[in-house]
Image (tube, coloured by chain):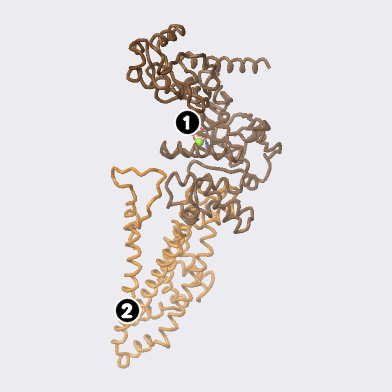
Amino acid sequence: MSDTQTLERDDAPAAGVPEPDDAPKRVRRSPGEVINSLSLVIAPVLIAGLGVLVFVYYRSLDLENAPTQQRSALDWSDRLQPQITQHLTIAFWSSLLTIVIAIPIGVMLTRPGLRKIAPGVLAVANSGQALPAYGLLVIGITVGGQGQRTAIVALAIYALLPVLRNTMVGLEGVDRNLLEAGKGMGMTRLQVLGRIELPLAVPVIIAGVRTAVVLTIGMAALAALIGGGGLGITIFSGIKLNQTPVLLIGAAIVILIALVFDYAGALAERFLKPRGL
Amino acid sequence: MTSKAKIHLDRVAKTYPGSKVPAVDELTLDILEGEILVLVGPSGCGKSTTLRLINRMIEPSGGRIMLDGEDVTKANPDKLRRRIGYVIQQIGLFPHQTIAQNIGTVPKMLGWDKKKIAARADELLATVGLDPEQYRDRFPKELSGGQAQRVGVARALGADPDIMLMDEPFGAIDPITRDRLQNEFLRLQEELHKTIVFVTHDIDEAIKMGDRIAILGERSTIRQYDTPERILAYPVDDFVNDFIGTGSTIKGLNFQQVSSLTLPDYPAIRPEDSADVARGKLDAAGEEWLVLLDDAGHPQRWLSTDDVAAGPSTYGEKGEEVGDTLNQDDTLFTALEHMVQSAAGKSCVVDESGRFAGVVEMAHLNKAIRRAQYEAQRHYEEMERA
Ligand SMILES: Nc1ncnc2c1ncn2[C@@H]1O[C@H](COP(=O)(O)OP(=O)(O)OP(=O)(O)O)[C@@H](O)[C@H]1O
Ligand SMILES: [Mg+2]
């Protein structure tokens, strides 16, 4: 989704005709908004098209007469379907873990007392993401052993950064004057946070969550390497056995899932945005 | 206006962390119940800081703040702020809340029930001149600057606080809308009798809005603290004098009314009076111009000695129209405006039924100004002695 912010500046008054300050303002939809809502319609069509393409390819493989390795690897009810479920399970728990860790930390790091250490924490989170994901999984194994749970935790840590950063950016981006106004009317700090800061930061935070979810879905393919299951099994066996169709199908399903969730994220960004913004 | 101190600042001081000089240096100030006190001074002198100390948006580094005789320096600041309306210059309406929700902010925190909050929001919208039907469900981005200012004021009035703090509330709007909002606000205040501390850097706004004005210098030190009349009549030092700028004496005329003048008899004639009668009156009064009245006694024209020469038949064409007339409750500033436009350099005063009641001339204004200056000076001399 391209950044259309720069297009949204068309509400300047028409040249020459100054509007009195007391006249009601007209509310128009900016070109940016129009493009955004257009993409909300076009994206699912493209995703569905890709889905159909993958399905047709899968059907055309003629698995009956394919090598056994390929046949068994691409078996729908024995392999693919359970792997998809595993994959989604890993991505779900891992994303949830990311959210429940990153958002509160993001909130805390923007409070007056802790603001000073925020750059430090961000630097650490940054370097966490700079680490190869595989490395993180290996470290995970040494700490938590093989298995799904380790994969979930490792992936959650890997995806912390976008949510953490966006939470902080979103909260810091709230107009100081609004906080001043809220405080001035007698809101407690918690009320200022809950009634003003968080609602106004929601769009940015959701954007971060969306990034994290898509990232997690992609990275969950690595879970297979440490015995966590998921579509990574199909992908890696495709590589190992030099069976391109197996590799392709596994990767295509991961991509499809990621696209679907990315689209869901776009919808959430659009519809969870507080009215009035 | 009762003369009870609603807010009392007792040697309140604030030094921002990391700063060597205090932003507010031991300020002692009484704000009376029901008055508008204006804090005015050059940029950076500490007006906003002073205002924000009152509702403890910033904690004082010294001194005490008393509300209604109660020391609130250590009170719970959140609860304190719910008792005090606060309007910031940037308005700060919450963009994700409707106008009604914005106005209901404090009532909601105070636990009012929904119906009462909604009714209050409608009431306040009407109070600030916005149609509730049309505006209650709008979002702030759907308002113009002037409307947003009004909503800002309405929101500060939310739970009917008896104290309002306003930091340049009409700062960021065009002069015409600003003037309108000022007038509306003054009218509102006549009904509401809030105790208001009003910050501005504009001396004209201060003069217009203030029952009293505190002119602040660096570190929020009070340079002069008095009614606008007295400040204009008697600026205590060069700082104040420079700050109120040129024309302050003339601005002072805004605070005196025509009714305060004792107007001597002034020569006037009826349409039927002969040239001799007219000349006789002019000579007797030692004036150059007389006023031609109509049969009902309403002033019509200024006529000079030459104008009356040809007698009653030509009165209607000679001289100049009297133009706008003054009432007893017009200010001397208005009188001056009329005067400088009139042929005679004087301005006619009429009674309630529009009949000629006398003439205001420069000498009157001169005397009025000098009297005000004298009284203000005496006031200060007495204070010094006391
Ligand atoms: N949060 C702050 N931290 C440090 N110094 C501050 C802070 N706020 C204000 N100051 C300083 O305190 C002094 C008074 O500032 P204040 O905002 O009260 O001035 P003001 O009279 O309201 O000015 P203006 O008319 O420009 O609004 C200034 O020198 C300013 O730099
Ligand atoms: Mg200020």
**Chain A as rendered: colour:** orange
Q: Amino acid at mark 2?
A: Leu
The residue indicated by pointer 1 is B202
Number of other residues with Cα within 10 Å of mark 2, as a class: few under 14, some 14 to 19, many 20 or more? some
Chain letter for brown, please: B
Q: Nearer the viewer, residue B236 or B287?
A: B287
Number of other residues with Cα within 10 Å of mark 1, as a class: few under 14, some 14 to 19, many 20 or more? some
The residue indicated by pointer 2 is A248
Question: Are the residues at dot 2 and dot 1 in contact (C-beta closer than 8 Å)?
Answer: no
Task: Where is residue B305? Give x, y as percent.
Answer: 37, 10
Q: Is residue B5 left or right of residue B172?
A: right
Q: Nearer the viewer, mark 2 or mark 1?
A: 1
Which residue is at 31% across, 44% downward?
A17
Q: Which of the image's four quarters has the C terminus of chain B?
A: top right
Q: Height in image: A78 above or below B57?
A: below
Which residue is at 45% across, 83% downward?
A82
